[in-house]
Amino acid sequence: MKATELLKRQHREVASLFKGVLASEDPDERMRLANEIATKLMVHTTIEEEIFYPAFREAAETQKGEEQVLEAYEEHHVVKLLVAEIPDADASAESFEAKMTVLKELVEHHVDEEEDEMFPAAERKLGKDRLEELADELEARAGQIERDAGEASERSSRSSAGA
């Protein structure tokens, strides 16, 4: 699998979760899905920022490529600001759906730019072999982030249970 395919797959997973959170009437289900979106976006933005964007930036060697990467970092920043609000959100509040809709639209805009502009350029500049290597790096790092988050959650649960 190529890095661009892996990232597109992650895009589809998050899009599906957004559909679910916006369709649900159950606050507990909405919160569960919103937290899953937050986790997936945290993993996705981290692996793009640490691995994919630097590789693309180096290979692109153009002003346009540089601008695409800088804009992508800024879009991630805005997404992270909204994602940070999810744990404290009230899924039964009328503002919850609006917050999730805004986040969904930000993510969709970002995905469209990546998939329409950055990914095709990356495929031309990086080539199949390098994109396959990057996919392995992305998957390994995503697994590490997920394990670290799981361990932190487990430690937090143990410490609050012992308090």
Image: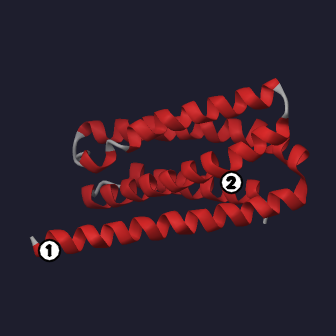
Residue 154 appears in view = yes
Q: Provide the residue designation for mark 2.
A: 8
Q: Quadrant of residue 35?
A: bottom left
Q: Position of residue 105 (x, y in %)?
A: 52, 36
The part of the image, by quadrant, that contains residue 103 is: top left
Left or right, 22 with reference to 59: left
The amino acid type of the residue labelled 1 equals: Ala
Which mark sits nearer the N-terminus, 1 or 2?
A: 2
Eyeballing the image, is 140 above or below 97?
A: below
Q: Is residue 101 left or right of residue 14?
A: left
Residue under the point 80% across and 40% down: 58
6 relative position to 101: left or right: right
Q: Look at the image and tell me in which quarter the C terminus lies.
A: bottom left
Q: Is residue 105 visible?
A: no
Q: Nearer the viewer, residue 8 or 149?
A: 149
Label 1, on which residue?
A: 161
Q: What SS does tag 2 mark?
A: helix
Give the color scheme: rainbow, by chain, secondary structure or one colour. secondary structure
* Residue appearing at x 36%, y 35% in the figure: 98
